[in-house]
Image (cartoon, grey):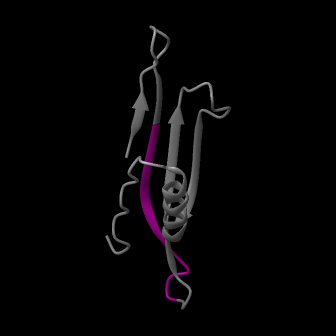
Amino acid sequence: LGSGFRMLENREEELTTVRVQDPRVQNEGSWNSYVDYKIFLHTNSKAFTAKTSCVRRRYREFVWLRRQLQKNAGLVPVPELPGKSS
C-alpha cells in the first residue's frame, strides 16, 4: 500500500509511503494466539516530526481504524479490508 501527493505551485513534492507486511503469529499454540503486522511509514512531509516509523498492529486495530475513517470520511469512500484469513 502506498500513497502520495504532489504539492501545487512548484513546491517540493511531498510523499508518504505506508507498507503493511511481515505477519507474525504471537502466542502460537495458546488459546489467545493472534497475528500482528508490521506497519512501516516513510515520509518527507513537513507535517511529520519523525520521517520514518515502524509499529506492529493486530487485524482488529485495522478494523477500528477503518470504522473511525468511515465516521469522518464524509463522501470519500474508505476501502474494504482484506479478509482476516488472507
* Residue 27 is covered by the magenta coloring: yes
Q: Nearer the viewer, residue 11 or 17?
A: 11
Q: In the rendered view, does 85 fall on the left or right side of 17?
A: left
The residue lying furthest to the left in this view is: 86
- Above or below residue 4? Residue 24 is below
Dominant secondary structure of the magenta stretch?
A: strand
* Residue interval drawn in magenta: 17-29
Q: In the rendered view, does 64 fall on the left or right side of 48?
A: left
Return the x and y of residue 83 as percentages of the image width and height.
Answer: 34, 70
The residue lying furthest to the right in this view is: 49
Instruction: Tell me what residue is drawn at x 52 percent, y 71 percent.
Output: 60
Q: In the rendered view, does 81 fall on the left or right side of 28?
A: left
Return the x and y of residue 25 as percentages of the image width and height.
Answer: 48, 74
The residue lying furthest to the bottom in this view is: 31
Instruction: Tell me what residue is drawn at x 54 percent, y 91 percent.
Output: 31
How many numbered dots are placed on residues in this image? 0
Instruction: Tell me what residue is drawn at x 51 percent, y 54 percent.
Output: 69
Q: Quadrant of the C terminus?
A: bottom left
Return the x and y of residue 23 as percentages of the image width and height.
Answer: 43, 64
Indicate the quadrant where residue 53 lies: top right
Q: Nearer the viewer, residue 51 or 68?
A: 68
- Above or below residue 71? Residue 40 is above
Instruction: Tell me what residue is drawn at x 43 percent, y 47 percent.
Output: 19
* Residue 84 is covered by the magenta coloring: no
- Above or below residue 77? Residue 86 is below
The residue lying furthest to the top in this view is: 10
Return the x and y of residue 1 as percentages of the image width and height.
Answer: 37, 46
